[in-house]
């Protein structure tokens, strides 16, 4: 699904910053992977490259067999809209749109009719236990509810991969557990390929592969065979 070979990225400035130093990584279809590292390790830059939000300087990146390199903004947006669903730490919901309108938005950009996108958005909100909150605005929702709206929005285009940037960073510990249980359920039951960027070991331990990154270099890659036996129990958002 994802194939990175010798990816380098330097931010130019008065003092150039070599952020990624020869990153090679393969993520197979249906894997649930965390990229874990401290602040400044290069994990967010790596996620931005995976999400076609940023270019790399050298190396190669293939997403589902498609070479991703130096795309025009229009082409990059097209690939993102078709292939990738994003979940952000700060939710990135539009404050003046209701939950269902936020979820519908990606389909609006794909030219889906109003009736069809509303129907699909309601189906996803219902799946995530939020049907009763569809007409509420973000400021009327809890942090966990906002993140579930954001997950519904990420899923609605039926992307090939979900990229989650510190998805629990703005949540309390109980809600963080629920969100990770939900992502785990999506991976196990729907076969969704999910990549989570985090600095928290508790979050990383919920995934089945942990990629450690430090100073722009991938170190240890752990196969987390015990991720199904969650220390948090089986309680989650989706009953």
Image (cartoon, grey):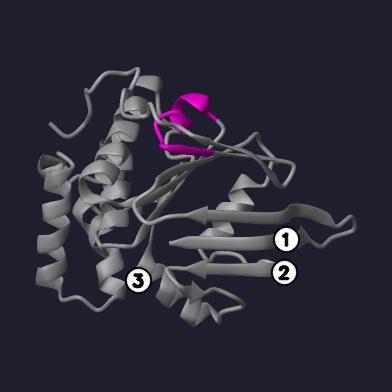
Question: Where in the figure is residue 207, as x and y percent of width and height?
Answer: 41, 36
Q: Earlier in the sequence, mark 3 or mark 2?
A: 2
Circle 2 Cα neighbour tier, 10 Å, few/some/many (<14 / 14–19 / ≥20) = some
Separation of marks 1 and 3 at Cα, in angstroms: 25 Å
Residue at horizontal 48 percent and vertical 81 percent from the top = 74
Chain part drawn in magenta: 200-210
Question: Where in the figure is residue 201, as x and y percent of width and height?
Answer: 52, 26
Mark 2 or mark 1, whichever is nearer to me: 2
Pick the residue in front: 198 or 187: 187
Q: Which mark is residue 58?
A: 2
Q: Earlier in the sequence, mark 1 or mark 3?
A: 1
Q: Is residue 207 magenta?
A: yes
Residue at horizontal 45 percent and vertical 72 percent from the top = 65
For mark 3, what is the residue? 82
**Circle 2 sits in a helix, a strand or a loop, which is it?**
strand
Residue 211 position by quadrant: top right
Separation of marks 3 and 2 at Cα, in angstroms: 25 Å
Residue at horizontal 46 percent and vertical 24 percent from the top = 202
Up/down of 115 relative to 199, above or below: below
Question: Where in the figure is residue 31, as x and y percent of width and height?
Answer: 38, 48
């Amino acid at each position: 699904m994802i194939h990175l070979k010798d990816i380098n990225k330097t931010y130019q400035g008065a003092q150039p910053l070599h952020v990624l130093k020869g990153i090679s990584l393969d993520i197979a279809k249906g894997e649930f992977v965390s990229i874990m590292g401290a602040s400044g390790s290069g994990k967010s830059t790596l996620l931005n490259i995976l999400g076609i939000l940023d270019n790399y300087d050298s190396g190669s990146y293939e997403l589902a067999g498609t070479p991703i390199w130096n795309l025009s903004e229009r082409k990059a947006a097209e690939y993102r809209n078709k292939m990738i669903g994003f979940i952000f730490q700060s939710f990135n919901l539009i404050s003046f749109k209701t939950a269902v309108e936020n979820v519908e938005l990606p389909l609006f950009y794909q030219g889906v009719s109003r009736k069809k996108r509303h129907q699909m958005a309601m189906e996803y909100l219902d799946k995530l236990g939020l049907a009763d909150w569809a007409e509420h605005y973000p400021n009327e929702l809890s942090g966990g509810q906002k993140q579930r709206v954001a997950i519904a929005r990420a899923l609605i285009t039926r992307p090939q991969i979900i990229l989650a940037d510190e998805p629990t960073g703005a949540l309390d510990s109980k809600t963080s557990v629920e969100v990770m249980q939900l992502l785990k359920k999506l991976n196990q039951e729907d076969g969704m390929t999910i990549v989570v960027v985090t600095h928290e070991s508790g979050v990383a331990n919920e995934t089945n592969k942990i990629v450690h990154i430090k100073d722009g270099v991938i170190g240890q890659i752990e196969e987390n065979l015990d991720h199904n036996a969650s220390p948090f129990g089986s309680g989650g958002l989706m009953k």
